[in-house]
Amino acid sequence: MILKILSNITFRITFAHSIIERDTLKSFLKIFSLLIFTSVLTCSCVSKKKILYLQDLEQIADNPANVNYNITIRGNDLLTINVSALNPDAVAPFNQPLVSRTSINGVVQTAQQLQTYLVSVDGKIEFPLIGTVKLAGLTRTQATEKLKELVSKYVKNPIINVRILNFKVSVLGEVQRPGTFTINDERITILEALGLAGDMTIFGDRKNVKIIREINGVKSYGELDFTSSSIIDSPFYYLQQNDVVIVSPNKAQIQSSSFNRNTSVFISIAGIIISVISVLTRN
């Protein structure tokens, strides 16, 4: 089929040569080549305003920092709760027992298992001796204080340590290493999340980065413009557990994805046309 098209094109050009002067063909060739060069040059140039991050960063120099990064416990969160005190025997009922393990060399080692609790859909856990405790909606500090108050009825001056094990964020789209990342310190900015994913590719749309968030079954989303320092004041600047960051492709990448497998064939045909015209217009 392609050979028939090329033969037809060659015939038409040969016929055109018999009725059109060579100067006209030369002019056509120059204009055609100029159009191709201009198109390539236009498509390959990208303004730095679309690439650089935080282009007005100096505007935040005197602004107060955004400290809205308190994470609240939600349903389906997986928690570790460790209770300690001066008297280890007094807090033993609140912790899992020591587990003895024998190493390869016959040395017996003991290790403390992590006491994990899955927060129910309605935000509650079952805590030893105390019973049902609702923790959903509380920050980690508030949950620690609440458990400390309850455990104090059984243990003098207890020390409570609460951590969220399933604090993860996902970064998808036009980044170097998309994936899901576990956050140990329960505090991460969207800039740090992009750093974990290897930063955006050159094809990432820096003006339209989306964050999907779900709290108590209700989904919300935000859109951030990374070329502006206003993202620092956004409620989505500090990520929460299970947030999903999506970096959309820019217009150039979207347009390139619309090319089909016949694109190379069309380019070859254009090259053949230029070659034939060049031969026919030689003096």
Image (cartoon, rainbow, N blue to C red):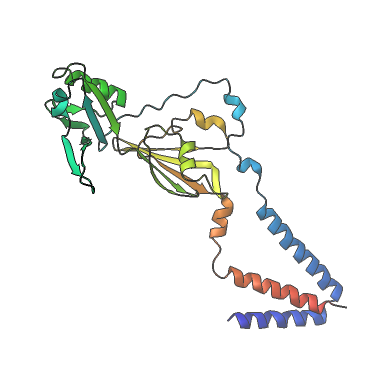
| Residue 139 makes an appearance in the image | no
84 sits left or right of 218 in the view: left
61 sits left or right of 224 in the view: right
Looking at the image, residue 182 lies above or below residue 32: above
Q: Position of residue 241 (x, y in %)?
A: 35, 37
Query: Seen from this angle, which residue lies furthest right?
Result: 283
| Residue 170 makes an appearance in the image | yes
The picture quadrant where one finds residue 258 is bottom right
Q: Position of residue 270 (x, y in %)?
A: 68, 71
Looking at the image, residue 28 lies above or below residue 45: below
Q: Position of residue 276 (x, y in %)?
A: 75, 78
Q: Nearer the viewer, residue 27 or 96?
A: 96
Quadrant (top left/top right/bottom left/bottom right) for the N terminus: bottom right
Looking at the image, residue 144 lies above or below residue 274: above
Number of marks present in the image shown = 0
The picture quadrant where one finds residue 160 is top left
Q: Position of residue 33 (x, y in %)?
A: 76, 65
Q: Going 44% across and 30% down the picture, which residue do you hit?
A: 235
Q: Nearer the viewer, residue 213 or 101?
A: 101
Quadrant (top left/top right/bottom left/bottom right) for the C terminus: bottom right
Q: Going 19% across and 43% down the picture, which residue do you hit?
A: 101
Q: Nearer the viewer, residue 29 or 141?
A: 141
Q: Going 80% across and 78% down the picture, which residue do you hit?
A: 279
Q: Going 79% across and 75% down the picture, which residue do you hit?
A: 278
Q: Nearer the viewer, residue 233 or 14?
A: 233
Query: Seen from this angle, which residue lies furthest left?
Result: 129
